Image: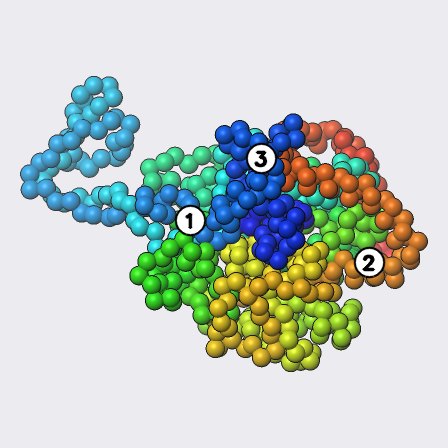
Amino acid sequence: MGGVNAAGRTSGHQAYRRTVLDALHKDDQTRTVVGLAAMMRLARHHDDGHWRDASGTILDAAELAARYRQQVLDHTLIRRIEDPRFNADGIPANRQAQLSFDSPHTFRVRRRQLPDDLPETWQVREIDRNTLEVTVPAGSFEVMLPERRPALVRAAGQLPSGFEPSRFYRSVHHPRGLSMAIFGASDCLGQSGLDWGALRDRLDPDAIAVYAGNSIGQLDDEGWGGLLKSFVSGNRATSKQMPLGYGQMPADFLNAYVLGSVGATGAVQGACATFLYNLRLAIEDIASGRRRVVMVGTSDAPITPEIIEGFRAMGALADDESLKVLDALTLLTDVDYQRACRPFARNCGFTIAEASQFLLLMDDALALETGAQVLGAVPGVFTNADGWKRSISAPGIGNYITLGKAVALAREILGDEALRQRTFLHAHGTSTPKNRVTESHVFDLIARAYGIEAWPVVAVKAFVGHSQGSAAGDQLASALGSFAHGLLPGIPTLDAVAEDVYAERLHFSRTPEAFDADAAFINAKGFGGNNATALVLSPKVTERLLIKRHGQAAIDAWKARQAATLEASSAYERQTDEGHFQALYRFGEGVLEGTELEISAERIRIPGYAQPVSLAVDNPFGSVND
């Protein structure tokens, strides 16, 4: 696993540890704070083995953690948006106006700033080769007047302050979401402890796939955002904005610049369930035998004025005025913004966020052969629509089906007692009034059907916000952290469960709680009726299944091979905890044309790839010549 969100880096469970920080052992707290401080460029670890602050003063890890702990806490997770446009500066905008002149009006303008097509009544006189004088007759004219509009939403789950993923590779006008994707996939490969080149060389290139995207494309100025407002903003469209805006572009970037994959690729967009939709493709490919390795992920960077305004206009976001009303306040402080997201409590809307999350999945035989780490297993992802709807954005009935199927599968694998006692829910938990009622009702009915009395509920959006298509990736990464550390994150903004929540069979906690989990359910409820639930098994349950399928001798041999993998993974985590990041980005390397391929009726050989692509295909249809 790899990536980044408002809590930090995914690898090494850093982001997860930030959400349970106070419940960790002191050494783990220090490691987490120091790693985040390095990520935020508050301190640097030098080749001489010492930490130094910005002034060059040498500090040991404990001193560094003590000095920067509060700054790290204040500038991670949900907080006041740090983009100056959302604060005193205001958001640049234009206002339509109609000007009236009682008499002719004259002004001067640079030649390149004057439109080519002018009204016939305008008179233009050249002052010099760069300057023109324009005389406008009396009358009325429509114009756009520049202004600064105060932000109506000022809370978001932003990446840790000071962390810019585009710094770690040769990024040239890349949208933020794609830079985050490069970092996330690189982090995933680093954490795996596997040599990607060696792994690729042992496989048919077509046994590898990448399913990655996001829910709404790249809508910042470097992508479709800048393209769509280029005319009205007076800026020229660039040659990169159109192609880099597509929603499948994270997969395209990984194939072209990180993995060099020629296997299956694509992205399924399913609003807030996008991550799970792509995960389902991977699982089905591996289960069918079509692929042996799949990288799955999403990368969303929606913290832009336009996207925020779009969600605010539909009443989905926790805007400033709603937060004031909720707590009877006249002024919001930094602490109030940090409490903006309140799943299953009295709430007023979700908090937008950015995140990039990636998983590397393998079939079980390959995982054993390569000595891969096993952080868990995903035996199934279920997706269902809502059917007939009134409002396209309103929740419906599909989530009852997805969770019901996931729980049924868990019971088949784990049994009734484990299902009831050792599973937990990773709720979509957006912090909207509708979500708290409808999602809790789904949980309640399924709990009743399976005899579950006190189902633990985790809602990680309380910490990192709603990262749109990457939201379930945030949830899944957190679940893997719970398996590793034995702690379920609490919901710290849950002062009290709202009265309309169906809480009788659910268990909520404000603080982290110890829990020995066999499995987690990752739940997603997306706009438009895009529902998905994934069943994720813990490493210990996965190992029991592997023993049953492959035998103890195969597992012992896997663990012996795993030593080198774990050593490489630990080395990567130490390096990144010290703030030394290196994104994998191979621009223009190994580019091939069709003339360089060797093609026969049985296979295609590609220069630079150790194994050929087999052209053997399954034909379930029979032959017309039989």
Amino acid residing under circle 1: Ile
Instruction: Pick whichever, 165 or 173, lies toward us.
Output: 165
Label 1: few (<14), some or many (≥20) within 10 Å? Answer: some
Label 3: few (<14), some or many (≥20) within 10 Å? Answer: some
Q: In whole angstroms, how far apart are the C-alphas of marks 2 and 3?
A: 42 Å
| Circle nearer the viewer, 3 or 1 | 3
Residue 422 shown left or right of residue 384 in the figure: right
Which residue is at 65% across, 42% downward?
Answer: 187
Q: Secondary structure at mark 1?
A: loop
In this view, the residue farthest toward the left is: 103
Q: Earlier in the sequence, mark 2 or mark 3?
A: 3
Q: Which residue is mark 2?
A: 543
Q: Secondary structure at mark 2?
A: helix
Q: Earlier in the sequence, mark 1 or mark 2?
A: 1
Q: Position of residue 578 (x, y in %)?
A: 62, 37
Q: Secondary structure at mark 3?
A: strand
Residue 624, image quadrant: bottom right
Q: Position of residue 66 (x, y in %)?
A: 55, 44
Q: Earlier in the sequence, mark 3 or mark 1?
A: 3
Q: Which residue is mark 3?
A: 59
Amino acid residing under circle 2: Glu
Q: Which residue is mark 1?
A: 81
